[in-house]
Amino acid sequence: IQAALDSDVTLGNDFGFAVWDRWNAMSRQARARSFLRANEFLVALYELLDADARERLCMNLDFLSEPFDVVASTARLRLSEFAVHSWDVRVAFDRYATLAAEATAVLMHGKPDLLPWVSEAEQLNGLQAVIKVITTDPSSTFALRLQVPISVDFDVPEQPDGILTLPAEAWVRLVAGRLTPRNSPAGVVSAGAADLNVLRTVFPGYWLR
């Protein structure tokens, strides 16, 4: 964000590697302390952006092919990190843990579209299907296209190849590779080509990348 605000700041191609090297060299206690400080600084920086900056400011992220705006895209990525990884901690103590409702509503739809990045279309083994996805809390209906690349849109066919009905937070966890049989809520219902075993293979989870 600072580099996007200041055109004189150049991060360089090795910036991300340098960040990880510094993190990996820290003790657990140092990580906990520095995380809190860094996050407070980041949130304060977001809040300092005026309306003009929020509208025009773009950032380059190494793993995405194009620049993305700060608020609608990169802040959403940060929210995803918090929502999913906090669930990773809570589910260790409560197998019925769910994602925070307020985060789920934001993460359901929006930019950037990370499905091609977090999915493994090669696991389809040639299968092509359009799944009608119906979510609750919040309610939404959209099409999951199992193809290369995997995508979602709101052009739902009248006769899809399968139907997947589930809570919205469970959909977000499915895409994040965190809807295991042990952690699936009772409201998950699949029919036709909406085979949960296939979908879990297609969405293996962020930790494998």
Image (tube, rainbow, N blue to C red):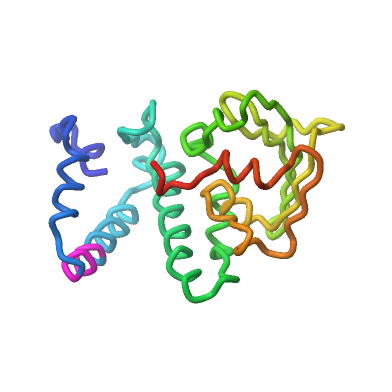
Q: In which quarter of the image is the N terminus?
A: top left
Q: Which of 31 and 126 is in front in this view?
A: 126
Q: Nearer the viewer, residue 71 or 140?
A: 140
Q: Residue furthest bottom?
A: 93
Rendered residue at 76%/39% (across/down): 132
| Dominant secondary structure (helix, strand or loop) of the stretch shown in magenta | helix
Rendered residue at 68%/47% (across/down): 196
Q: Which of 21 and 109 is in front in this view?
A: 21
Residue 157 lies left or right of residue 1; in this view the side is right
Rendered residue at 46%/43% (across/down): 72
* Residue 5 lies within the magenta run: no
Residue 41 lies left or right of residue 191; in this view the side is left
Rendered residue at 60%/63% (across/down): 183
Q: Where is residue 209 in the image (x, y as percent from the top left)?
A: 39, 41
Residue 51 location, quadrant? top left
Residue 156 location, quadrant? top right
Q: Where is residue 180 in the image (x, y as percent from the top left)?
A: 59, 57
Q: Eyeballing the image, is 135 above or below 130?
A: below
Q: Eyeballing the image, is 138 above or below 152?
A: below
* Residue 34 lies within the magenta run: yes
Q: Position of residue 116 (x, y in %)?
A: 51, 31
Residue 142 lies left or right of residue 27; in this view the side is right
Q: Eyeballing the image, is 36 above or below 178?
A: below
Magenta region, residue range: 29-35
Report the label total: 0
Q: Which of 92 and 62 is in front in this view?
A: 92
Q: Which residue lies furthest to the right in this view?
A: 158
Q: Position of residue 204 (x, y in %)?
A: 51, 44
